[in-house]
Amino acid sequence: MNKYMKTFALTGKEKMEIQERPMPEIVNDTDVLIRMIRVGVCGSDMHYYKEGGIGSQVISYPFTPGHEGAGIVAAVGKSVQHVNIGDRVAIDPAMSCGHCDQCEAGRPHTCRNLKFLGNPGQAEGCLSEYIVIPESSCFAINNRLGFDEAVVSEPLAIGYYATKLAGDLKGKSIGILGFGPIGMSVLLPAQLQEPAKVYVTDRLEHRLKIARDSGAGWTGNPDETDVVSEITRKEPLQLDFVFECCGKQEAVEQAIQLLKPGGTLLIVGIPEFSHWSFPVDELRRKEITIKNVRRQNGFTRPALDLMADSTMDVSPMVTHHFPFEETDKAYALVANYEDGVMKAMIDFSAGRYDD
């Protein structure tokens, strides 16, 4: 095996380049070495790409981004039991310690010592030919799933967790504000609970079309339509649940206007700013419940199972593929919402990175 590998690193705001790094090594007995095959470009990656950080997590350049990944097991530590060399695996980017108060309380997603792929100060990302990650973050996939689905399990797990955190959606009216990959990852599992109707908003028509094709009962563009008035006209008693999936202040304000008294707002999107602002009068008078959604919380395997059982079709989410050498083009495309992009994938199996 080579002593060096290639990685695509951020070197400044909206600047990326291929660099050569030492091959990662197995250090712990539970470590797994993965040869990366596919990496997804996520909306949160765009914060690092465009702004150089998310809140207190500020990049020190150069830095390798990426946390949505899938690959093939190349080597394992001596205590690894659940994956073998040659297995195709999906990756959960969260690496919890397993022994802090949060982990022991069944909250590994808020682990006191959590490390997350592609987060500054925690772990370099998976946009490299090889990575080492704990066995607990590796999920073997069967032949019914491709590498695209394995990658999509990362955002899908977040959406699936969000719908479970909401509670019983059966027969309820719900809203999804923002229909990027996270919005779609909320819609698909939400439908399994048979809500009465799902209302979706987004500023991009091609995404609204995907929402309609995926089962949304109503869609609207807030730049062209007064979505609050239109949805309230159809739902005079207003909505039971609203999932904010775009990280926009105006979406949070719309959500509070749309929710009925006693309704629940679930904040899934990551904003570009550091503080939300809420219309206190309406929030208080309606007694709105606000829940923040923090990553996957154990839903990676359930998300994979839903796709493997053909329970849901995630194929419309993946719209573009780029070879590893063109990662910078993929990031620019996603950052500028060009060419009808929903989810772009980086493919290591193309060209000289042959599978």
Image: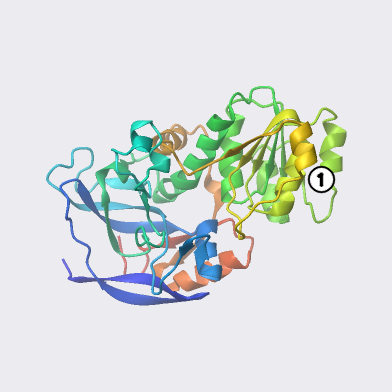
Tell which of 244 and 353 is nearer to you.
244
Write down the residue under mark 1.
227
The correct choice, above or below, for 258 with respect to 86 in the image is above
Residue depicted at x 80% and y 56%: 223
Which residue is pictured at 42% across the width and 67% down the height? 323
Residue sitting at 73 percent across and 35 percent down? 217
Q: Residue 236, position in %: x, y?
A: 85, 29
Answer left or right for 328 relative to 2.
Answer: right
The mark tally for this picture is 1
Q: Position of residue 303 (x, y in %)?
A: 45, 37
Q: Identify the secondary structure beneath mark 1.
A: helix
Position of 265 compared to 127: left or right? right
Res. 201 visible in picture: no
Q: Amino acid at mark 1?
A: Val
Q: Is residue 232 visible?
A: yes
Quadrant where the C terminus sits is bottom left
Q: Position of residue 187 (x, y in %)?
A: 61, 38
